[in-house]
Structure formats: C-alpha cells, structure tokens
Image (cartoon, helix red, strand yellow):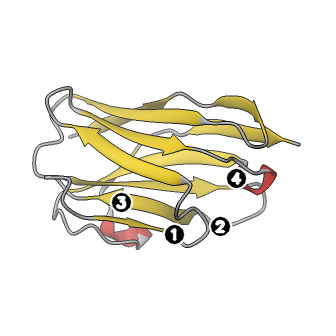
Amino acid sequence: QVQLVESGGGLVQAGGSLRLACAPTGRTLSNYAMGWFRQAPGKEREFVGTITWGGMYTDYAYSVRGRFTISRDNAKNTVYLQMNSLKPEDTAVYYCAADRENMGLSGIHNYDTWGQGTQVTVVS
C-alpha cells in the first residue's frame, strides 16, 4: 500500500511562489498518475492538476492554469507542484493523490491513495 507525504507548504505573500513535493513511503510511484487537489475551509475538495506516469500528459483546473505546474522526477520518486503568482484564494490544504490506473483524470474518485495534506496560506 502506497502512503504519500506532502511537503513544502507554508505562508507566502500574494504574488509569491511555493513548490510542493509529494513522495511515497512503502513503494514507488511506478505506473501511477499523480494528482494534486486542495480544500479550503468550508469548501469541498477540488482538483488542481494531474500528471501521468511518463509525464507526457498534464491537466489543470482553469483557476490555476498558467500559474501552477506539475512535474515529476521518477528517478527521485517525487512529484512536484510549482505554484507561482499565488493569490489569497489559493489558500487551502493541498493534497497529493495516486491513481493506479494512470488515467490522469480530475475526479476525486479516480484516485486510490491520498496524503495527509500540507497547508498553503497566501496573504495579501
């Protein structure tokens, strides 16, 4: 069973950048698509972006397109979410998730394993 650990969250001013990382414990991310989701207080968890195993396909939520970039280093067994031009509305707990079917989809139900999340707070 894959367990995922996110890191890199924190407090940043609007317009700033953060890079989140997600790494597994217990096994590799081989053949898994990886997704990033976020959940703000009082709101439902929402899709941020996804990347397939080979990195050839990525997809993003409209709200982050052009500002966020997902990448992965399979040699390091790590997935990243580079967040630029951050806005206060990006404040949320960010979760990474793994999809054993490597589909690269946006639905929460497509992902089998979730991390515990890392807090991102953007202040104006």
Badge 2: how crowded within 10 Å, few (<14), some, or many (20+)? few
Q: Earlier in the sequence, mark 1 or mark 2?
A: 2
Residue under numbered circle 3: 50
Element class at badge 1:
loop
Please indicate whether residue 63 sits to the left or right of residue 105 in the image.
right
Percent across and percent down for residue 92 are 68, 49
Residue farthest along the right direction in this orientation: 124
Distance CA(mark 3)–CA(mark 2): 18 Å
* Residues at discs 3 and 2 in contact (Cβ within 8 Å): no
Q: Nearer the viewer, mark 3 or mark 2?
A: 3
Tell me, yes or no, whether the two marked residues, 4 and 1, touch with CB atoms within 8 Å. Answer: no
- First in sequence: mark 3 vs mark 4: 3
Q: Earlier in the sequence, mark 2 or mark 4?
A: 2
Q: Earlier in the sequence, mark 4 or mark 1?
A: 1
Q: Residue at 20% x, 40% y: name it.
A: 1
10 shown above or below 15: above
- Residue at image point 75% right, 39% down: 121
Label 1, label 2: how far apart the Cα atoms are: 14 Å
Secondary element at image label 3? strand
Image location of residue 38, percent across then percent down: 58, 55
Q: Disc 2 or disc 4, which is closer to the eye?
A: 4
Tag 4: amino acid: Asp
Dot 3 or dot 2: first in sequence order is 2
Residue at 48% over, 41% down: 82
Q: Quadrant of the C terminus?
A: top right
Asked whether the beta carbons under mark 1 and mark 2 sit within 8 Å of each other, the answer is: no
Question: Which amino acid does the dot numbered 1 rest on?
Answer: Ala
Kindly identify which residue carries mark 4: 90
- Identify residue for label 1: 61
Q: Specify the amino acid type for callout 2.
A: Glu
Identify residue for label 2: 44
N-terminal of the pair, mark 3 or mark 1, is: 3
